[in-house]
């Protein structure tokens, strides 16, 4: 019988905190490692054991040896593309060295499986074809995507040489409650909060760039299925549809009865033009499919941000 401990890195952040909640519901004891650089203490689950720690800290090994998790869900990261362009060394320190440090700790603690949060939006660069399947060449434009590709490479090596089993989930643009609306990533949360506060959202470039938006509960479900099914491999996790940033603006404008137009600013460096993900492998092997339509997910996100905004 495997011990039912799961360790979630980044468990105080947007996606990680939802995974923690869901794994606790599933009966796991959950330990969280997060340095709270972007995550929030209020988002920590009261039943989780919390270690405030940098994933690159050598003492991480002691935590894993103590907790002896059966599965590690690795969601801690420097999580924005612009920050990776400003400071690629910091990005690599957290996202590459932190991940290798975690893999070493997994090896020392005999961890069975790592689930890694990779990026379907950033890892392929400007795709040769759409929708992008998992065999598409990896040509990331930003250091953030290069780090994700490097970690996928390390996982494959740890799998071959040390027997570490792993699942890579290449998410599209995940959105929903608890995404930081004041950050540089998460266009839906950023636009919605700006509209709620009567500010004018900024669109970089023409706004015709397309992303594959996937709602948080669907992303969490992919994690649970990957663990339950002991799925080895790499999976795109998205809606399979491309939605332009202009379209997101228009949807939110309708939901919030916002009157202004967006402000357009020059395109940002390393911005992928259009991406949408072929998720048929996840459908086939994980029995996963996205269930929350964009309109519905946007409404949930706006409701959440409205409540948060009133309490500020
Ligand atoms: N949100 C998306 O659309 C999306 C898409 C693709 C991949 N991802 C990946 O999913 C994961 C979670 O993303 P998110 O959107 O929840 O971001 P987030 O910033 O909300 O969460 C990241 C968490 O990691 C923590 N963290 C950062 N540096 C750390 C360090 N050195 N040591 C320990 N903890 C550290 C932060 O405090 C935060 O709680 C990340 O790996 C991200 O790259 C996210």
Image (cartoon, rainbow, N blue to C red):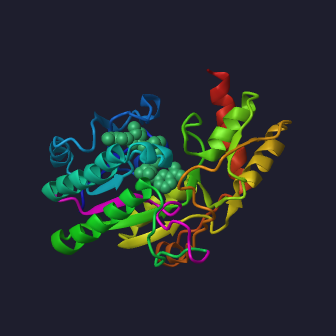
**What is the magenta segment's predominant secondary structure?**
loop
Q: Is residue 41 left or right of residue 244?
A: left
Instruction: Where is residue 274? Give x, y as percent.
Output: 63, 65
| Image-quadrant location for residue 255 | top right
Along the horizontal axis of the image, is 94 left or right of 80?
left
In x, y percent, where is residue 37?
39, 34
Where the N terminus falls, by quadrant?
bottom left
Pinpoint residue 300: horizontal percent, then vertical percent. 68, 44
Q: Which residues are magenta?
A: 110-130
On the rendered structure, is 38 left or right of 160?
A: right
| Magenta stretch: includes residue 114 | yes
Residue 195, above or below 107: above
Q: Residue at x 32, y 46 (%)?
A: 89
Considering depth in this image, is 152 or 147 the residue closer to the camera? 147
Q: Residue at x 27, y 44 (%)?
A: 55
Image side of residue 276 versus residue 69, left or right: right
Give whichever of 41, 66 is nearer the camera: 41
Please state which of residues 89 and 11 is positioned toward the viewer in this rendering. 89
User: Would you say residue 79 sits in the magenta stretch?
Assistant: no
């Amino acid at each position: 019988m495997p011990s039912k401990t799961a360790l979630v890195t980044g468990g105080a952040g947007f996606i990680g905190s939802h995974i923690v909640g869901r794994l606790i519901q599933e009966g796991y004891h959950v330990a969280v490692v997060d340095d709270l650089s972007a995550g929030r203490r209020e988002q920590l689950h009261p039943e989780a054991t919390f270690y405030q720690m940098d994933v690159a800290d050598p003492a991480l090994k002691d935590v894993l040896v103590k907790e002896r998790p059966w599965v590690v869900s690795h969601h801690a990261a420097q999580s924005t593309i612009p920050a990776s362009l400003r400071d690629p060394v910091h990005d690599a320190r957290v996202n590459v060295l932190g991940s290798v440090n975690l893999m070493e700790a997994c090896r020392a603690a005999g961890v069975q499986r790592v689930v890694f949060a990779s990026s379907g939006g950033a890892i392929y660069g400007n795709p040769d074809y759409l929708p992008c399947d998992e065999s598409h060449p990896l040509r990331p434009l930003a250091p953030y995507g290069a780090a994700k590709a490097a970690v996928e490479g390390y996982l494959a090596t740890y799998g071959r040489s040390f027997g570490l089993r792993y699942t890579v989930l290449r998410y599209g643009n995940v959105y929903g409650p608890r995404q930081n609306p004041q950050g540089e990533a998460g266009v839906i949360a950023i636009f919605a909060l700006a509209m709620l506060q009567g500010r004018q959202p900024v669109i970089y470039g023409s706004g015709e760039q397309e992303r594959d938006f996937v709602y948080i509960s669907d992303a969490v479900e992919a994690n649970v299925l990957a663990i339950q099914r002991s799925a080895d491999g790499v999976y795109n996790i998205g809606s399979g549809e491309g939605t332009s940033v202009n379209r997101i603006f228009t949807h939110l404008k309708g939901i919030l009865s916002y009157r202004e137009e967006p402000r357009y600013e020059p395109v940002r460096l390393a911005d992928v033009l259009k991406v949408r993900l072929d998720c048929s492998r996840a459908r086939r092997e994980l029995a996963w499919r996205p269930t929350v339509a964009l309109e519905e997910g946007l409404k949930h996100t706006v409701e959440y941000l409205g409540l948060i905004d009133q309490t500020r």
